[in-house]
Image: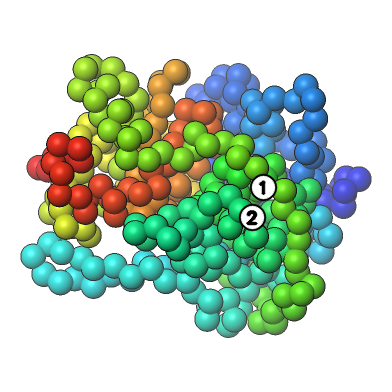
């Protein structure tokens, strides 16, 4: 039934939020995949609250089902963001693939979830001054962009993309990093929404009526890694310790058979977890939790307690889909960092000492 905020309790979410028996001990200890325990409205932290308590609570809510979203679409306390995008690819021969980052605004105008506001992931949330494409915008710029999209600090945000999850998790990662306390991603995105025959609309809200107030803050700087952080992790691994470096690109890019930068290969000590291995290609969204956990553990990409995982891809986007999966499976935010520059930065450097690579 509806709580005091007007948002109903969600059912046990699909995909990654489905519990497996072997994970229940971890879940009881760390709070992952938990059933809804509090009201759905984001609650600003008060004195005595801890990030770990907030994190345990949100982990059970952050992967939203289509059923939950359908029931809550009319709530005044819910903001829905459409973040559909694409990475266009052109094979130039010789293993080189040239990419083009695209926002699918025309898809939004052709039909979107009722009430959703479109976010252009290539323009609205990026640092336009960075030489590396699609880097996360500074706090003030990001906050202003989110307010223009109707984001309020005290409302629940639900983000969706086409169903591949990477663009939705990118915006989830950014909003969470900058302090929003109730951000969710729609499991399956538009692909599952349409497969289930749910309603869409083509109208777009008036920008002047959408404006919100988002009190962004520098809450989780550790969720972002830079080249120095990656270099330090590599050096620690050289010495036999340190964290994990997790590569979310395709296996062809990981091996060096395909390149999307001046150089081909991977960061030393990286383990390969192509983000698509965690996605349900038929329905969109994540594969079940036990399968995701198996994939990550088999590839050596599940951080042990006290170990930090640094993730990368080409532009710091697909890596957030793996980041979110690890977080859903119980890895705390403090143990995860997304290398925003990713291969778009590392693979385009000529300094082999400062930016070492290996290839098969």
Residue at mark 1 to residue at mark 2: CA–CA distance? 6 Å
Q: Is residue 35 left or right of residue 167?
A: right
Circle 2 crowding by C-alpha within 10 Å: few under 14, some 14–19, many from 20: many
Please say if 159 is above or below 331.
below
Circle 1 crowding by C-alpha within 10 Å: few under 14, some 14–19, many from 20: many
Query: Mark on residue 143?
Result: 2
Estimate the x, y position of residue 50 in percent, counting from the top left: 70, 25
Q: Is residue 294 visible?
A: no
Question: Which mark is first along the chain, 2 or 1?
Answer: 2
Q: Secondary structure at mark 1?
A: loop
Which image quarter: residue 134? bottom left
Estimate the x, y position of residue 111 in percent, counting from the top left: 61, 79
Q: Is residue 315 visible?
A: yes
Looking at the image, which residue sits at the far front? 129
Q: Name the residue at 58% across, 58% down.
A: 141
Q: Name the residue at 8% across, 65% down.
A: 94
Which residue in the structure is indicated by mark 1? 216
Q: Is residue 236 left or right of residue 124?
A: left
Q: Name the colouring of the figure.
A: rainbow
Mark 1 vs 2: CB contact within 8 A:
yes
Q: Is residue 74 left or right of residue 150?
A: right
Please say if 167 is above or below 195.
above
Please say if 358 is above or below 235.
below
Quarter of the picture holding the C terminus: top left
Please say if 12 is above or below 117.
above
For the residue pair 55 and 37, the one nearer the viewer reads as: 55
For the residue pair 13 and 29, the one nearer the viewer reads as: 29
Q: Name the residue at 35% across, 49% down.
A: 341
Query: Mark on residue 85?
Result: none
């Amino acid at each position: 039934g509806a709580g005091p905020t007007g948002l109903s309790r969600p059912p046990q979410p699909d995909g990654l939020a489905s519990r497996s028996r072997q994970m229940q001990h971890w879940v009881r200890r760390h709070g992952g995949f938990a059933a809804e325990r509090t009201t759905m409205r984001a609650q600003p932290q008060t004195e005595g609250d801890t990030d770990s308590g907030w994190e345990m609570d949100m982990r059970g809510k952050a992967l939203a089902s289509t059923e939950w979203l359908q029931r809550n679409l009319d709530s005044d306390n819910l903001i829905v963001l459409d973040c559909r995008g694409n990475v266009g690819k052109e094979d130039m021969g010789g293993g080189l693939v040239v990419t083009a980052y695209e926002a699918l605004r025309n898809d939004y105008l052709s039909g979107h979830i009722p009430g959703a506001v479109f976010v252009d992931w290539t323009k609205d949330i990026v640092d336009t001054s960075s030489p590396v494409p699609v880097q996360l915008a500074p706090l003030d710029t990001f906050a202003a962009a989110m307010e223009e999209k109707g984001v309020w600090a005290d409302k629940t945000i639900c983000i969706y993309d086409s169903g591949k999850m990477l663009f939705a998790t990118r915006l989830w990662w950014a909003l969470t990093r900058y302090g929003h306390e109730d951000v969710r991603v729609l499991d399956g995105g538009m692909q599952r929404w349409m497969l289930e025959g749910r309603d869409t609309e083509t109208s777009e809200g008036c920008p002047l009526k959408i404006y919100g107030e988002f009190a962004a803050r520098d809450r989780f700087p550790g969720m972002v890694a830079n080249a120095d952080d990656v270099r330090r992790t590599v050096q620690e691994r050289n010495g036999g310790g340190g964290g994990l470096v997790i590569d979310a690109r395709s296996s062809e890019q990981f091996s060096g058979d395909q390149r999307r930068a001046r150089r081909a290969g991977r960061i030393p000590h990286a383990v390969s977890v192509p983000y698509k291995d965690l996605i349900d290609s038929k329905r969109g969204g994540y594969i079940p939790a036990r399968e995701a956990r198996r994939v990550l553990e088999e590839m050596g990409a599940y951080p042990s307690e006290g170990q930090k995982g640094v993730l990368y891809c080409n532009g710091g986007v697909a890596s957030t889909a793996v980041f979110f999966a690890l977080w859903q499976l119980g890895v705390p935010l403090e143990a995860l960092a997304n290398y925003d520059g990713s291969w778009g930065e590392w693979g385009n450097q000529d300094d082999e000492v400062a930016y070492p690579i290996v290839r098969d």
